[in-house]
Amino acid sequence: MSITLKSKILLLIAFIILSFSSKGIKNVDSLLHVIATSVNDSSVSDAYLQLSLIHSLNNPKLALSYINLSIDKFNKFSSDFQYNRFLKKGEIFRLLGEIDSCLHYINMVYAQGMKNNKFLTVGECYSEYGLVNIAQGNSQKAIEQFMKHLAIIKKYKYKKELSGIYNNIGIAYANRGDWDMANEYFLKALKDDQTYLRDMNLGNDYNNLGVVFLIRYGLDSLKKNNNLDSARKYLNKGLFHRYKIHDSIGIAGSLNNLSLIENETGNFKLALSLADSAFKIASLNGYKKIQVEIYDSYDQIYSKMGNFKMAYAFLNKKNKLNIAFEKEQLNNNIQQLESDIQLEQKQKQLLEKDLKLTRSENQKQKQFGFIVLAVVLIIALMIFLFYFFKNNRTLSERNSLISEQKNVIEEKHKDITDSITYAHRIQSSLIPTQLELNKKCPKLAILFQPRDIVSGDFYWYSKINDVNIFVLADCTGHGVPGAFMSFIGINQLNTIVNEKGIVSPQQILNELKKGVVSSLNSNQDNTEKKDGMDVALISFNEHELFFSGANQSVLIIRESQLIELKGNKQPIGLSENNESFKEVKFNFQKGDRVVLYSDGIVDQFGGELGKKLKTRHFKAWLVETSYLSLQEQKEAITEKLNLYKENYDQTDDITLAIIEI
């Protein structure tokens, strides 16, 4: 893996903070209701505190306003020292990049905790110091601070979740380049969160493991040993859990990580699409620091594509936004000084009433320090403004072109998303649900799991007089290409069966092949001759079944035994073999079950060795569950499949139909 990719991912991995427990955090609406209706200052203060916990990652500015309101409400009914609130305020300042303000509050909490033997709070201060050390590039010092926190928890046997500390230690080792130790602690974090069902943390855990996996073994080695999908598995799993908890800052980071991987493998189209999605989330939520990193990703992608004009444009965007981000931080520091001074004065009055003279002298020194800091920040702001306006003259000439290109990219992304959504609506209207099917064919169970939003698998049912006709098809590809192929198949079946009245499986498949070939245009070149579908088609009544198949078989379960009816070895579509499809007749016994399935089941990766399920294992599942009722058998197969694939991504569209006679 290139050095550029390493540094990029390490910047993203460092966004993780000390984890907090999600237990007891209420719904946002219920917290706002408490604030609006409660006359109890304690309840209102707690509600503001929990709102700051909820928003600290996604919107630290909003979290800061909530923690300030919580502190003000607390002061109205108590003069006690506010350990949790000041610790949280320090953490929020760190997330905003304001390290001096962060250390001010953490030092205050640490001193008070040591004075009053609040060792759990002291331990949390050590972890916050460690995170500051990471931000400042001192990984060794960070590890020492996190280990102090662990030592306190073990010494006093506190019941405290450890995954956040393990993650932070892993980050520190990663920043040092010690990938073995980083991997060890990230695995500890994942195990701890899985044991105690902390869904809030799993996105960070999987993302970290994916990043370390890539850097630890290197892209070249992963591609050589066909293990790149294993690395993507971790990152995609992290992305899934971040979507699940609406962690927008984490989602943007995961998407940007994945875009860099695709860039390194030469999949530029997907790399740009992932970067586009990451940038859209970052810009909508105001994550300027991540926007800077995504601009850098665009620079890398376009440079590797050889489009140096676009690469240069995004490099300029990155520089301009970086200057604006630093300017904003300076403005925030200056605006916060006055409120911090007032809050510090009020807290000291409450805590040190018996030391008024000493307090007054200390306050003067602190005020003087803040004034000096304000002067330094103002001077720094003036310097940054000077360079900003100087650089702005050069960048302004390109703003029009950059804005135009941004609009084009956003419009294309919207068009693609709208098209997929529209295709999903169309396909949903064409493929009936199990509830709809059971009104016509009560003893039928369906498992239908598309890999993407839309599916390349489809099933179709019709009844002509007393003859039931059921089709299960697996189209070339999955997602949008497979879905469009399914539209062709369903349309052809409606014409052949419902309009022409053909019920013979052999004749239906022959007609279907002609129709699909005609739709695909027989003048396609050799590279397109794989387009089409594999189909299992049965017509049946209570006594007998007729079957024809295109690269598909049908299984009959009879008294814990399997009987396989095989079709032709040719697809529905363009192929070298154009022979007529054969038709197989089968006489039923009461209790027989007919099984049709797509290859997405048997091709699914999983298990301890990460291998395909294979047909023999699937057949064994069918026999093992054949004593169950029809619906129970479908549910049991579904559960077995989910357990088998476990942490592996779904390989292909999955469809299973079981019909009982």
Image (cartoon, rainbow, N blue to C red):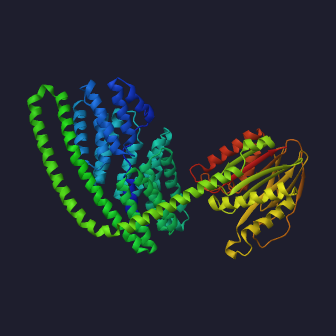
The quarter of the displayed image where residue 379 is located: bottom left
Left or right: residue 225 versus residue 169 is right
Query: Eyeballing the image, is 457 above or below 365?
Result: below
Q: Residue at x 49, y 66 (%)?
A: 221
Confirm whether residue 260 shows in the render: no
Q: Nearer the viewer, residue 352 or 397?
A: 397
The quarter of the displayed image where residue 314 is located: bottom left
Q: Residue at x 22, y 37 (%)?
A: 108
Q: Residue at x 34, y 42 (%)?
A: 62
Q: In x, y percent, where is residue 235?
A: 49, 55
Q: Nearer the viewer, residue 229 or 341?
A: 341
Q: Which image quarter is the C terminus in?
A: top right
Q: In x, y percent, where is residue 184?
A: 43, 51
Q: Nearer the viewer, residue 637 or 415?
A: 415
Q: Nearer the viewer, residue 359 or 290?
A: 290
Left or right: residue 577 versus residue 91 is right
Confirm whether residue 246 shows in the render: yes
Query: Eyeballing the image, is 269 above or below 158?
Result: below
The quarter of the displayed image where residue 624 is located: top right
Q: Which image quarter is the N terminus in?
A: bottom left
Query: Eyeballing the image, is 340 above or below 483?
Result: above
Q: Residue at x 21, y 40 (%)?
A: 340
Q: In x, y percent, where is residue 403?
A: 40, 64
Q: In x, y percent, where is residue 63?
A: 34, 41
